[in-house]
Image (spheres, helix red, strand yellow):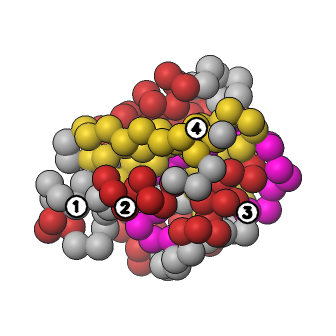
Amino acid sequence: METFGERSATFYNLLVSLKVFDWAYGLAYRYVTRLVPPGNYVLEIGPGVGALLRKLEQGGYKAVGLDASPPMLKRAQRRAPGVSTIGVSFKAPFRGEAFNAAVALFTVHHWGDHEGSVEEVRRVLKPGGYFVVVEVDLRRMPLVGSHGCTEECLKSVLERGFHTVVEKRFPLLVAVAKKV
């Protein structure tokens, strides 16, 4: 598992203030809104500095962030003062079936234990809940190195306990996984 310190948090905060990733936050947000209506509980795994978390809160969702990086989470709490907590994807500190949806934007490639993390997402999702994963498509954008996934990678990561559809939205892949 990869974690981010103070320098990374400062850098990402700058990128967010420059609106570099607004298009990706908008895409992830639109997927969530198609799957669950406002008023529902949404877990963002790896909210970073909180840009998507804020968008979810402003859209009427009960958004909760889970991040392993205290410096990132500190900035997320400033941007989106709702509930956020320190934790890791493979050991989420939430009761089972607490969320209607979960979203991971540009974070799954940082997870060390994919199997344990996906099982935790399943555990905290309500029956029929959705997990939206957005990653850079490594087949179309190989220059990003390990900071992305292939369609096959996403399907294999999410195959256990989810019905998954992966859509190509250049330069991204969006996996919509429904808990079964």
Give the label, 4 or 3, closer to the camera.
Answer: 4
Pick whichever of labels 4 and 2 is earlier in the sequence.
2
Q: Are marks 2 and 1 in contact (CB under 8 Å)?
A: yes
Pick whichever of labels 1 and 3 is earlier in the sequence.
3
> Which amino acid, by three-letter code, is at mark 3?
Ala
Residue 101: say if magenta.
yes
For residue 157, side relative to residue 118 (left or right):
left
Q: Real-space Cα distance between discs 1 and 3?
A: 28 Å
Given the current orientation, which residue lies at the most extreme right position? 95
Q: Secondary structure at mark 3?
A: loop
Q: Is residue 139 visible?
A: yes
Q: Quadrant of residue 8?
A: bottom left
Q: Real-space Cα distance between discs 4 and 3?
A: 19 Å
> Which amino acid, by three-letter code, is at mark 4?
Lys
| Residue of label 1 | 138
| Residue of label 2 | 153
Q: Are marks 4 and 3 in contact (CB under 8 Å)?
A: no
Residue at coordinates 31% horizontally, 46% vertically from top-left? 173
| Residue of label 3 | 92
Q: Real-space Cα distance between discs 2 and 1?
A: 10 Å
Residue 143: say if magenta.
no
Give the label, 3 or 2, closer to the camera.
Answer: 2
* Residue closer to the observer: 139 or 144: 139
- Using the image, determine if residue 62 lies above or below residue 59: below
Q: What label does residue 178 carry, if any?
A: 4
Pick whichever of labels 4 and 1 is earlier in the sequence.
1
Q: Real-space Cα distance between discs 4 and 2?
A: 17 Å
Residue at coordinates 37% horizontally, 61% vertically from top-left? 153
- Using the image, determine if residue 38 lies above or below residue 171: above
Residue at coordinates 67% horizontally, 60% vertically from top-left? 119
* Magenta residue span: 92-111
